[in-house]
Image (cartoon, rainbow, N blue to C red):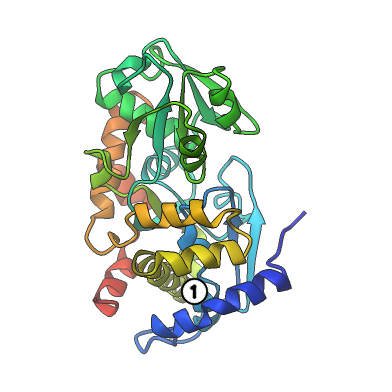
Amino acid sequence: MHMIQSRRDFLASAAFISTASLLGAREALADPGPPETTTIRLARIPAICVAPGYIADALLRAEGFTDIQYLPITHGNAVARGKIDFHLETAAWVASNIDAGEPITALAGVHGGCYELFAHDPIRAVTDLRGKRVGIPQTLGSSGHLLLASMAAYVGLDPHADIDWITSDSGDFLEDFVQGRVDAFLGFPPEPQELRARNVGRLILSTTTDKPWSQYFCCTAYARRDFVRTHPIATKRYLRAILKTADFCAAEPERAAQALVDAGFAGRYDYALQTLSDVPYDRWRDYDIEDSLRFYALRLHDAGMITSSPNTIIADGTDWRFLNELKRELKA
């Protein structure tokens, strides 16, 4: 059942209108005309770190989108299947899916790391995961699996043989970790905040602060290849709204957190505020998304999880034209 943005959500997001005007919500002179479509379909998932995709409503409307739909998705490539138009995923996932021949195009890096790895004693490092039960959401090949597999390969583990991957269709491993049914758990907000509040487990690695992971993009904006080709104006307008909202999250995390709660995308203001205060949303101008894709593609290639070279993945599945234009237009 499609969950199209309700009137309640729209009214809640109206509080963001003043912010939109602050960030310059208006037609850009550089654009040749209105978007080719006024309908845009986006994903609604439990992760609150993808806040720029949730609270950009006013900016998206200013860009000419009048029918903004937030649709619940489960695992699988909903963008490639034509169920939604744009989404944010980890650079590792994007590289893997381009390698698999999925018809997607990476557009920009949006923010740095948000995933955190928790474990029970005696695990104190990624190298200690050898032979351990590690919970990942959904299936092998999901974002969490590919990201942690990259970490394992980086420290010399074989992700195929050295780790006992525990999967679940529901993807709810927080309680499994709390009850000790898995030894380690890679979570995204608000899961790490919940574990800290309950004083469960030990933080082993944070992609927000621990190098080299903190030096690369986590979430990457991408779209269907044919949508980018046939809707270039809409693609640029979507991306501009998302990147402006990322700036807002970095500059005013308190207001952004309240907007998330008001629009129904986050249940707790304190968890939302902690996420928006910690995740580096101001890196999209500074970090190089191509370097991030290359970094993760190398890790996955070394682990035997993809066959394409980083250069092939970048050549086949990226389009940086819109990002480069927006970097010039949206100079700080």
**Residue farthest to the right?**
1
Mark 1 residue type: Ala
Would you call the spot at circle 1 few (<14 residues within 10 Å), some (14-19), or many (20 or more)?
Answer: many
Decide if residue 48 is on the left or right side of residue 220: right
List the residue tagged with mark 1. 234
Quarter of the image holding residue 298? Answer: top left
Lateral position of residue 247 relative to residue 273, left or right? left
SS assignment at label 1? helix
Against 67, residue 134 (above or below) is above
Residue 295 in the image: x percent, y percent?
Answer: 25, 40
The image position of residue 318, as x and y in percent, is 35, 55
* Left or right: 71 as drawn, with respect to 164: right
The residue drawn where x is 33% and y is 30% is 150
Residue 307 appears anywhere in the view: no
Asked whether the viewer can see residue 177, the reply is yes
Q: Residue at x 25, y 22 (%)?
A: 155
Q: In this view, does 258 lie above or below 104?
A: below
Look at the image and tell me in which quarter the N terminus lies: bottom right
Q: In which quarter of the image is the C terminus?
A: bottom left
